[in-house]
Image (spheres, rainbow, N blue to C red):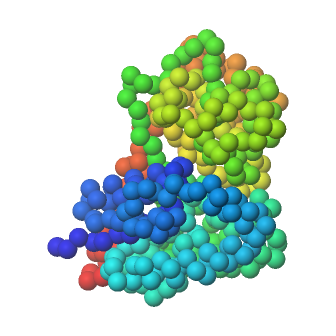
Amino acid sequence: MKKKKVLIICRMDGFANSIRPKKIKNLLEKKGFEVDILDTITFKINDENKGRKVSILKKKLMEFLKRYFLDYLINFYFKNNGKKIYNLIKNKDYDIIICETEMDAYLFFEDIKAIRILDLPAPLIEELYQGNLISQKKYDELIRKEIALYKKVDFLSFHWHTYSNYVKKNIYNGKNFIELNWGCDPKSKDILAKFSDKPKIICLGYLEGYWVNLPLLSKLSKMYPIDIYGGPKPDKKWGLNYKGYAPSLDILSKYQFGLITITKDKLRKSSFSSKHLEYLSYGLPVLTPDWREDSILEDVSIYYNENNFLERIKEVSDKRKWESMSKKSYKKSQELKWNLNLKPLIKVLRNYFEDNKGV
């Protein structure tokens, strides 16, 4: 039987969302699919540069456009990217197309025969609105397009169940939802985090979006030393102990707590940080804002706020309590392995092809 051909459309920018397409590709190839990745930073298929070699001048230009011409930029992407991708792949005969970004997903309004799967980090238009990046008028216009897109695809998923629940409650609740949660790779026990009577805290990841809550991170850093890795480099005004990009994720094993900061807006209360699972995979207890609730991660979250931050650290800093929490964290990571959390995708595709023989 001829292998089913899959195209994953994504942006390989070197941050966390670049991990998921490769994990999906690996899983599908193990199950007998033929898989390509289209990076819409370079607009090349299976390009090894992953779009990360962007000139400083181009970065500055994009930042200028995002800041002053966001409405134009959104319309440009929505109107042009779909057609550009369509023209690139229209003769490729893909059976399944998985799109990881809303900006590129307007391809699905084109005349394609492939199964359409929209797999998103977060609801983009809601994110822009909650971050005060678009007006109410622009939100009302774009949310209609977003809902039309959700209706158009065969399957709709988000990178974590809390985002799916948020969309179902506030935006769209169709029958095409599937659950494909983020995953992790639990590390070998010889490199897991170890107890220290002088606990160190690490904050790892993207440092630019409003949702990162740099003001909160700054306040916490004044209360307790926090080593911060990731990018782009934060402004000096925040007074952060910024240490650049981590040389390896194994640096997590040198710490006793992983830290998450997040804003309090409606969307982010229902959001997800991929680094939470990365912390868990090293057996790190995770400090999480108490305004974020998550049924899956509740038992491996040390919930804090600005007033009780030091108290919460102290509560888990004795050897017995820390080792208990570390063990629980590592066990949770084993329950959230990539191959387990992406397994529903295989089931959905097999059922689809069985129900639609000849497609």
Horizontal relation, residue 289 to residue 182: left or right: right
Q: Which quarter of the rendered picture does the C terminus lie within? A: bottom left
In the rendered image, residue 145, in percent from the top left (x then y), is placed at 65, 79
Between 32 and 349, which is closer to the camera in this rendering? 32
Is 351 drawn above or below residue 295 in the view shown?
A: below
In the rendered image, residue 356, in percent from the top left (x then y), is placed at 31, 81
Residue for point 61% across, 75% down: 77
Q: Is residue 312 visible?
A: yes
In the rendered image, residue 178, in percent from the top left (x then y), is placed at 48, 64
Furthest-bottom residue in this view = 111
Furthest-left residue in this view = 1
Specify the quadrant of the image occupied by residue 325.
Answer: top right
Residue for point 57% across, 14% down: 196
Between 158 and 85, which is closer to the camera in this rendering? 85
Between 284 and 102, which is closer to the camera in this rendering? 102
Q: Can residue 347 be seen in this view?
A: no
Residue for point 41% across, 48% down: 338
Between 108 and 323, which is closer to the camera in this rendering? 108
In the rendered image, residue 148, in percent from the top left (x then y), is placed at 61, 81
Q: How many marks?
A: 0
Residue for point 36% across, 58% down: 25
Specify the quadrant of the image occupied by residue 135.
Answer: bottom right
Is 23 drawn above or below residue 325 in the view shown?
A: below
Horizontal relation, residue 297 to residue 184: left or right: right
Q: Which quarter of the rendered picture does the N terminus lie within? A: bottom left
Horizontal relation, residue 332 to residue 219: left or right: left
